[in-house]
Amino acid sequence: MAVRWSGQKRVSVGGDWPYPSGEQWSISSGDHRATLVQLGGGVRSYEFGGEALLAGYSEHQLPPAAAGQVLAPWPDRLAGGDYNFRGDSFSLPHSEPELHNAIHGLSRWLPWQCSQRRDDAVTLSCLLAPQPGYPWPLKLSTMWHVSSDGLRATHVVTNVGDKPCPFGLGAHPYVGVPGVRLDGLMLQLPVTWRLLVDEQKRPISRVQVAETEYDFRSLTPVAELALDTTFTGVRHGADGIARSRLALPDGSRGVEVWQDSAFGWLQVYTGAGVTGRSGEVVAIEPMTCPPDAFNSRESLIVLQPGQRWTGSWGIRPHR
């Protein structure tokens, strides 16, 4: 029972998996439209006024380079795939084989199911079953919602097992300003520190961004600075929201990625060619913890049996 894809044509040979990323759910409100997918429960596209603010992918593709995916039960890298938790040792497969790391969690290749749907919102859920390397069951749910305020993701994660477990979550949206390359744009990040990493991308220390080329506290040219960088010291406003912006030099048009107080970290990535829009997009990734948090314990969440965690982030046009 399977489905084969040949170019743009789907050939059903008994089974019900309509596209490589599974079933597709479209939501809309006014000029805002988004498409969510079954594979990984992530966002494939987000448009405002017919312009793509999210660098997504075709329904005939798998999500490239984690585009639009939910990263759980850890974001970013787990160095060597090995960690200890409460006296026990665990090993996970090297999903980043070139650096011998486990990367971006376990939920992004699982099928998520639609548990609620309306015209402007859809809630997708899955059960992360116990497995070698991560023997704790988690129930994951994301409500995706579009409104006049843009696209919003609200994540809810519950430990449905009988033992405490380590946990972190991140998101991986690639954003851009339609028709403008990164070298013509300005970036603003509400951060005060960045992490230094070793050749395995494992954090080794932190330094202040002030008076360095990584100081994006005000709108600063992206230029040709290659970023695969973790930032912290995230400044949340009085409303509990931290805002990152990618905008034209005069600030007149751009896109904003916001995160609530559940997310105290940012990963920013300008990797070339990852979504077919080389030099045009940047991943601005809200995270609850830094890379390798299962080992460092920094900002690591320990979910008790029955405990629920929730956090929100979103994307909106900046005019």
Image (tube, rainbow, N blue to C red):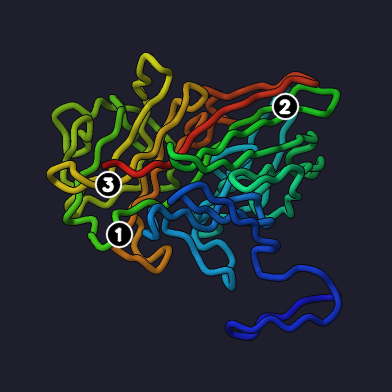
**Identity of the residue drawn at 37% across and 59% down:** 51
Reading the image, the residue beneath label 3 is 254
Above/below status of 245 relative to 37: above
> Mark 3 Cα within 10 Å, few/some/many (few <14, many 20+)?
many
Quadrant placement of the C terminus = top left
Frontmost residue, 124 versus 98: 124
Name the disc covering residue 178, or none: 1
> Mark 2 Cα within 10 Å, few/some/many (few <14, many 20+)?
many
Q: Secondary structure at mark 2?
A: strand
**Identity of the residue drawn at 26% across and 63% down:** 179
User: Residue 139 at x, y = what percent?
Assistant: 76, 35
Reading the image, the residue beneath label 2 is 165
Above/below status of 249 relative to 196: below
Q: Amino acid at mark 1?
A: Pro
**Identity of the residue drawn at 57% across and 24% down:** 300
Q: Amino acid at mark 2?
A: Cys
